[in-house]
Image: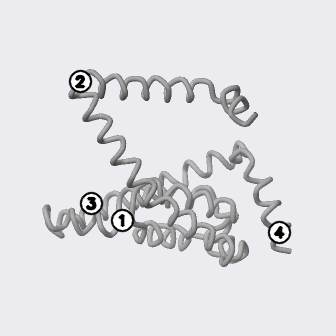
């Protein structure tokens, strides 16, 4: 029953996945070297994801349970001021990993009523100033380059996140189903 439901809801995803699987098996069977390399890279990436994602989801779950909505709303919500962007940049700087870590955290922040512009600043800053990436960059290009890049990019991140957040607020945009998720989470905590 569930398989039929998934096939009906996501036919393109299932079709692309089936074509990819056929291509990988065909490459393995015929000895097509580029296809075999693609398959090895895919399995390597899949293994990395399976090692990282359970930890990420556990940490996001703990964040959801331990951190109160009022705390996030106070420091990162509407009316929290410019300091909320500083908190978002600092939080983004401490994340390790790529988007597979940053996106669930950003969603958890938004569900806990962080301002959308602050969430956008968090997402953008995570691509710019994560500590491991910064250390790697500074070791090859020097601290002067890294400081100049931060001095130029971080104000732009804050500025454009605020502008995009304001634009979404003017249009009363909300992410789909977030209000329902928030209401369910609050009902469980009561």
Q: Position of residue 34 (x, y in %)?
A: 23, 28
Of residues 34 and 111, the one nearer the viewer is 34
Of circles 4 and 3, the one toward us is: 4
- Image side of residue 33 versus residue 182, left or right: left
Residue under circle 3? 149
User: Which residue is drawn at the image coordinates 69% and 60% (left, top)?
Assistant: 111
Of residues 61 and 36, the one nearer the viewer is 36
Of circles 2 and 4, the one toward us is: 2
Say what secondary structure mark 3 lies in: helix
Upstream in sequence: badge 2 or badge 3: 2
Residue under circle 4? 188
Residue under circle 2? 32
Whether 45 is drawn above or below 109: the answer is above
What's the distance in space between the residues labelled 2 and 1, CA to CA?
38 Å
User: Which residue is drawn at the image coordinates 68% and 47% (left, top)?
Assistant: 175
Residue under circle 1? 130
């Amino acid at each position: 029953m569930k398989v039929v439901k998934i096939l009906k809801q996501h036919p393109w995803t299932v079709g692309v996945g089936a074509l990819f699987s056929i291509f990988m098996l065909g490459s393995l069977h015929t000895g097509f070297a580029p296809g075999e390399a693609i398959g090895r890279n895919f399995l390597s990436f899949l293994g990395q994801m399976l090692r990282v994602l359970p930890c990420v989801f556990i940490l996001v779950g703990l964040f959801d349970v331990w951190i109160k909505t009022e705390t996030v709303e106070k420091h990162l919500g509407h009316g929290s001021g410019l300091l909320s962007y500083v908190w978002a940049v600092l939080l983004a700087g401490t994340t390790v990993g790529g988007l597979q870590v940053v996106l669930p955290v950003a969603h958890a922040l938004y569900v806990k009523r962080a301002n959308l512009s602050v969430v956008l600043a968090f997402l953008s800053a995570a691509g710019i100033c994560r500590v491991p990436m910064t250390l790697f960059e500074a070791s090859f290009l020097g601290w002067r380059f890294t400081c100049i890049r931060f001095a130029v990019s971080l104000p732009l991140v804050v500025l454009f996140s605020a502008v995009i957040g304001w634009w979404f607020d003017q249009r009363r945009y909300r992410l789909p189903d977030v209000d329902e998720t928030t209401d369910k989470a609050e009902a469980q905590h009561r």
